[in-house]
Image (cartoon, grey):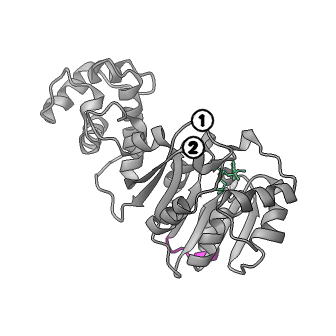
Amino acid sequence: MATLGNPKNTIEILNKYQFMFQKRFGQNFLIDTHVLEKIIKSAEITKEDLVLEIGPGIGTMTQYLCENAREVVAVEIDKNLIPILENDTLAPYDNVTIINEDILKVDLNTLVQEKNAGRRIKVVANLPYYITTPIIMGLFEAHVPLKNITVMVQKEVADRMQAGPGSKDYGALSLAVQYYATPYIVANVPPNCFMPRPNVGSAVIRLTLHEEPTVKVADEAFMFRIIRASFNQRRKTLVNGLTNAAELSVSKEQVQSALEQLGLPVTVRGEALTLEQFARLSNLLKG
Ligand code: SAM
C-alpha cells in the first residue's frame, strides 16, 4: 500500500473508489507530508498511547498514527470512506479500530474506559471546520480523560483560542479553552496543503490539558454565563453587560461592589479581565 500524504497517491485512491467530496462534511484532505510529520511530532505520540482520530478521511494521518501509537480509534461519519479505510489504506494495520459514526454521538468516556482502562488518551485531527467548537468543547465538558488535543483548525479560530486580554481575538472561546488547557500554535498551514483547497487559512494547534485546574471556581457553569454575557456586548462596560444579561440576575450594585473588591475600575470592559479575574468575579457574585 502506497503511503498517502502526497497528491499523486491521494488522487489514485480517490479515482479508484470514484470518491465524491462532500462539502457538508468539511472534507479537505491533507496532501503535505511535512505538515503530517509536524502534527505527529507535536502531539508527542508514543507506543504507549491510545489515539483518537476524528475524521480520518481516506486514512492519510491515520497511517502515521498507526505507525507511531500503540492503538488508534478513528471515527468517520461518511460511510463512503469506510471501505477505502477497511479494505485499502488501513488494511495493513492491526492496531486500528474504525467507527462509522458522528463524533458528537460517540460516548467517549466509555470508549476510553474500554480501550485504555480509563487512562488519558490523545486526540489528533484535521477537523471538519463546521463543527470545530462543538467537538473541542464537547471533549472538555464531558471530562474525557485527555493528555492533549492536536488539531488542524481555521487559522482565525486558532488565534482566538490562544489570545489573551487586550487582543482583538480574545473572547469566550479563549477563556473556555484556557480554563481546560494550555494552547500552543504549532504551525500555520496554507490552503495548498489540502485537496480540495479550503478558502480559509489553517493552523495546527496543540491544547495540553491542565493536570490540576489553574483557577478555583465555585460554579463553572455560572462563570461561563458571566464570560458569555461580558463578551456578548463587547462595547459595553462589564457592569452594563452583566446587569443587562437575561440569563444572569445580578444587580448593578453587586457587580460594582465585586469589581471594587477585585481592585478593578467600575468602567472596566470584559475584554480586559484575565481568566483568574473572571473566576474571582464569578465567585464573588455567586456568594
Ligand atoms: N483526516 C483526513 C485528512 O487529514 O486528510 C480528513 C480531514 S477532513 C478536514 C475532515 C474529516 O472529518 C472528513 O473525512 C469528514 O468526512 C469527517 N467528518 C465530518 N464531520 C464528522 C463528524 N461529525 N464525525 C466524524 N467525522 C466527521
* Residue 231 picture location, percent across and down: 38, 28
Could you say where residue 227 lies in the image, as x and y percent from the top left?
37, 34
Foreground pick, 253 / 164: 164
Chain part drawn in magenta: 115-120
Query: Crowdedness of circle 2 by 10 Å Cα count: few (<14), some, many (20+)?
Result: some
- The reply, left or right, for residue 50 in relation to residue 177 is right
Q: Is residue 286 above or below residue 80?
A: above
Question: What is the C-alpha distance between the residues marked 2 and 1?
Answer: 7 Å
Examine the structure image and report whether residue 183 is included in the region drawn in magenta: no
Left or right: residue 82 compared with residue 72: right
In this rendered view, identify the residue nearer to me: 248 or 86.
86
Occupied quadrant, residue 262: top left
Specify the amino acid type for callout 1: Asn
Query: Mark 2 or mark 1: which comes first in sequence?
Result: 2
Residue at 49 percent across and 71 percent down: it is 120
Q: Element under label 1? A: loop
Quadrant housing residue 277:
top left
Q: Residue at x 78, y 66 (%)?
A: 85
Frontmost residue, 80 versus 33:
33
Q: Disc 2 marks which residue?
A: 191
Q: Residues within 10 Å of mark 1 (few under 14, many from 20)?
A: few
**Residue 100 higher or lower than 173, as above or below:** below
Residue 199: image tag: 1
User: Do labels 2 and 1 touch, CB within 8 Å?
Assistant: yes
Residue type beneath disc 2: Pro
Residue at left 38%, top 34%? 171
> Where residue 251 sits: x, y (%)?
30, 21
- The residue positioned 43% from the left and 40% from the top of the image is 173
